[in-house]
Image (spheres, rainbow, N blue to C red):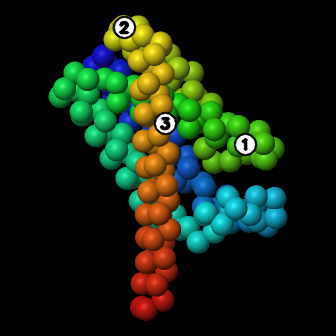
């Protein structure tokens, strides 16, 4: 398992670097399209800055590393597996988003690359851990729930930090 544990944060950061580099410029370039076709989603990111987005990704990476460390120190891999499955589900969501809007989104290329690697690591991990279908299902629900709650928190951080930076830059 040790050889698989650290693939979770490596694949996560590989994927999220594409988002950090390109998402905010892409969002600004596509703001008219997004605000008309997907106003609720656009509103979530309307005031976001690249720095705020990077802070949100950093917070998510810390959670990912924390799950890896818990697994390593306790030999309890369920939360790690659930988090990794949640992250893999996240890749599927990005691919689906790109298909739905029929446009490239700065996250889809690395999602496509990371998806088969992630599925393989999950498959091998389940085999090595000898988890039952119900254990995998249970940890998947927990992982997806934790990631969804944390994503809401990360977005809150992103918006708050972006507003702070805007206010700070206007004061100077």
> Residue 60 placed where, x, y %?
40, 48
Say whether disc 3 or disc 2 marks the residue closer to the N-terminus.
2
Residue neighbourhood size for the residue with mark 3, other residues' Cα within 10 Å, grouped as few (<14), some (14–19), many (≥20):
many
Find numbered disc 1 in the image and state the secondary structure of the residue it sits on.
Answer: helix
Q: Position of residue 45 (x, y in %)?
A: 61, 64
Read off the residue under disc 2.
130
Task: Tell me the number on the disc at residue 123.
Answer: none
- The residue located at (38%, 45%) in the rendering is 61
Identified at 74% across, 63% down, the residue is: 39
Q: Secondary structure at mark 2?
A: loop
Residue hosting label 1 = 98
Q: How many discs appear?
A: 3
How much space separates mark 3 and mark 2, taking CA atoms?
21 Å
Q: Eyeballing the image, is 15 above or below 57?
A: above
Say which quadrant the N terminus sits in.
top left
* Residue located beneath label 3 in the image: 144
Q: Earlier in the sequence, mark 3 or mark 1?
A: 1
């Amino acid at each position: 398992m040790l050889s698989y544990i650290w693939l979770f944060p490596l694949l996560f950061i590989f994927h999220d670097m594409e988002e950090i580099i390109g998402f905010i410029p892409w969002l600004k370039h596509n703001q008219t399209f997004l605000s008309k076709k997907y106003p609720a989603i656009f509103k979530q990111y309307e005031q976001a800055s690249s720095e705020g987005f990077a802070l949100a990704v950093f917070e998510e990476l810390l959670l990912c590393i924390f799950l890896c460390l818990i697994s390593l120190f306790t030999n309890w891999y369920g939360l790690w597996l659930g988090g990794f499955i949640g992250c893999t589900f996240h890749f599927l969501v990005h691919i689906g988003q790109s298909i739905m809007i029929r446009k490239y989104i700065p996250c889809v290329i690395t999602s496509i690359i990371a998806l088969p690697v992630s599925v393989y690591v999950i498959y091998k991990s389940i085999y090595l851990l000898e988890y039952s279908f119900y254990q995998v299902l249970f940890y998947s629900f927990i992982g997806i729930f934790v990631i969804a709650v944390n994503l809401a928190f990360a977005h809150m951080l992103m918006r708050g930090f972006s507003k702070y930076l805007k206010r700070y830059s206007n004061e100077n």
